[in-house]
Image (tube, helix red, strand yellow):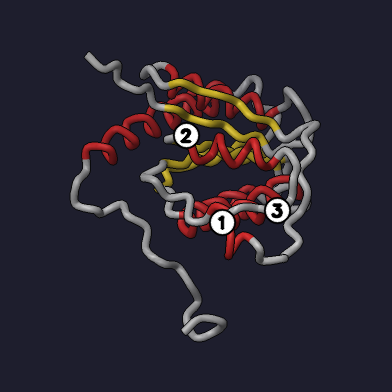
Amino acid sequence: MKEEKRLKVLGISASPRIGQNTETLIEKVLEGSASLGAETELYTISGKNIGFCTGCSKCRETKKCVIDDDMQELYNKILETDGIVIGSPVYYYDVTAQCKMIIDRTIAIAPINGNKVGGIVAVAGSLGLSEVVKNLNMYFSVQGITSAGWVAVYSPVEGKPKAQKSAFELGVKIVKMINAQKMERTGAYNKHSSFAYGTHTL
């Protein structure tokens, strides 16, 4: 009998710092996913060589990014996973520059789609949580990824059991939604084209 493939949930920490609040909360989300049997992985951009999109548009022809850096590894992980958790601390009232680079560079594999489910982690010292959630939700929508929700926390994460419980529950919800989508046969979760019609489109 063929062994059933385990679901995969990938956590991407877009913080330039290792082992800090954002990463801690993503790990808690992944714990929730793992509790339902999912295979999980934490990918942190800290120390990685990921450059910004140059706008060369070559990926429109080849469906591949011409920049040879660590983003090539991340492309494969994103395409192979069933669930994606993206976490970013607030830098100047929005996502980090590293997070924005990932968003921009994944135009090369757009639409990601594939009935994937996404979750968001946002951590702030003061203002900016809503901007991170808004922008990552928009990113999921454009990429055809169904959002399972978000966890937004003011640092430090340690000593906030409700926040960690919410993160764990988000991880559980992601796996449940992945399973539900895999059983769905009507095409309700298929991506539609999202453009601002009347500008550069017909």
Task: Give the label, 2 or 3, closer to the camera.
Answer: 3
- Mark 2–mark 1 Cα distance, whole angstroms, equals 18 Å
148 lies above or below 160 = below
- Mark 1–mark 3 Cα distance, whole angstroms, equals 10 Å
Q: Name the image quarter holding residue 32.
A: top left
Provide the residue designation for mark 1.
63
- Could you classify mark 1 by the number of other residues whose Cα lies within 10 Å: few (under 14), some (14-19), or many (20 or more)? few
- Could you classify mark 3 by the number of other residues whose Cα lies within 10 Å: few (under 14), some (14-19), or many (20 or more)? some
Please tell me which residue lies in front, 64 or 34. Answer: 64
The answer to whether the residues at label 1 and label 3 have Cβ atoms under 8 Å apart is no
Provide the residue designation for mark 3.
66
- Residue 94 in sight in this render: no
SS under mark 2: loop
Please tell me which residue lies in front, 123 or 126. Answer: 123
Percent of width and height locating residue 2: 26, 17
**Counting residues from the N terminus, which is met first, the one under dot 2 or under dot 3?**
3
Percent of width and height locating residue 109: 55, 52
SS under mark 1: loop
Report whether 157 appears left or right of 134: right
